[in-house]
Image (spheres, helix red, strand yellow):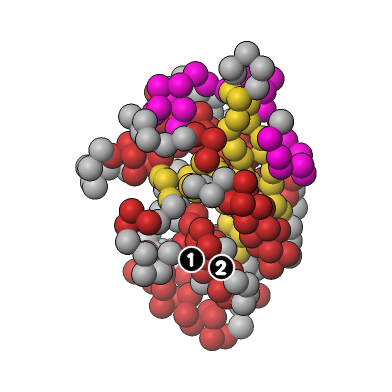
Amino acid sequence: MLGHIKIENVLFLDIETVPQYPDFHFLDETTQQLWEQKVTSLCKDGQTPDNIYERAGIYAEFGKIVCISLGFVYQVEGGQWAFRLKSCFSDDEPELLKDFSEVINRFRIQHPSMLLCAHNGKEFDFPYIARRMLIHGIELPVSLDVAGKKPWEVPFLDTMELWRFGDYKSYTSLKVLTHIFGIPSPKDDIDGSQVASVYWKEKELERIVRYCEKDVLAVAQIMLRYKGLKPIASENVFSGTKFTDG
């Protein structure tokens, strides 16, 4: 499977998002009205738009990105796979997005055939990043500027879509795939539903970063399994600001 994909050209990523404000009542009147219009149909069992505001993080119009973790696979001595991680994170979203843009542009120079890969990335991560960049007036990197491109020209891989094998009714979570493939779960501390609380109430951004990096590593491990390649050993996972081979 995926024999035509050179794994070293793939840049894996994951994003963590939260509502733009800690509480619905921080929104201006117009934004409150727009949120109510967006989610009124989703309210169940006495819920109201204000008490489901914690879901705002999943919508690029009402949320923001607090972390983007990226990683790539390369070989080390003995032919083993290694993984290099870098996370762009900040309370200042424009700063984070500019850092991210610089990272993927540098990687693309080194790997002109670069592909971006995420789990459910085509439905969530890639469009969310692009929308938030446009909102802040940040130029889209070439890899995200896909308007008008033919499907085979879009440099996106999606481990969830690949698992479908054409079955468009299927949704398979990252947690399920890591379990069935025997890959350590990235959800051993928090999961996506808790990120907003950890950010706004507990103010533990670095905890979110660790969680995000685990997700990226899990996506890379799944892609290696798809290609029938050996997994990355824990001692060959490196994290830090430096983002070059080895």
Q: Is residue 232 magenta?
A: yes
Q: Do the residues labelled 2 and 1 touch (CB within 8 Å)?
A: yes
Vertical placement of residue 94 versus 188, above or below: below
Side (left or right) of 171 relative to 78: left
Q: Relative to residue 98, is residue 16 drawn left or right?
A: left
* Rendering coords of residue 185 (x, y %): 53, 28
| Residue occupying image coordinates x 43% and y 64% | 146
Q: Is residue 25 magenta?
A: no
Disc 2 or 1, which lies upstream in sequence? 2
**Is any part of residue 196 visible from this angle?**
no
In the image, what residue type sits under mark 1? Asp
Residue 175: image location, x then y, percent: 46, 33
Q: Quadrant of the C terminus?
A: top right
Estimate the x, y position of residue 113 in percent, counting from the top left: 49, 47
Q: Mark 1 points at which residue?
A: 145
Q: Nearer the viewer, residue 200 or 154?
A: 154
Furthest-right residue in this view: 241
What is the span of residues highlighted in magenta in the rendered image? 223-245
- Numbered tag placed on residue 140 in the rendering: 2
How far apart are the two marked residues, 2 and 1, measured between alpha carbons? 6 Å
How many residues crowd mark 1 within 10 Å: few (<14), some (14–19), many (20+)?
Answer: some
Report x, y in % for residue 139. 60, 71
Instruction: Residue at 32%, 57% (x, y): give it.
Output: 151
Kind of element beneath mark 1? loop
Q: Residue at point 25% right, 38% down? A: 165
Q: Is residue 176 above or below residue 231?
A: below
Secondary structure type for disc 2: loop
- Is 124 left or right of 216, judged from the image as shown? left
Crowd band around label 2 with a 10 angstrom C-alpha radius: few (<14), some (14–19), many (20+): some
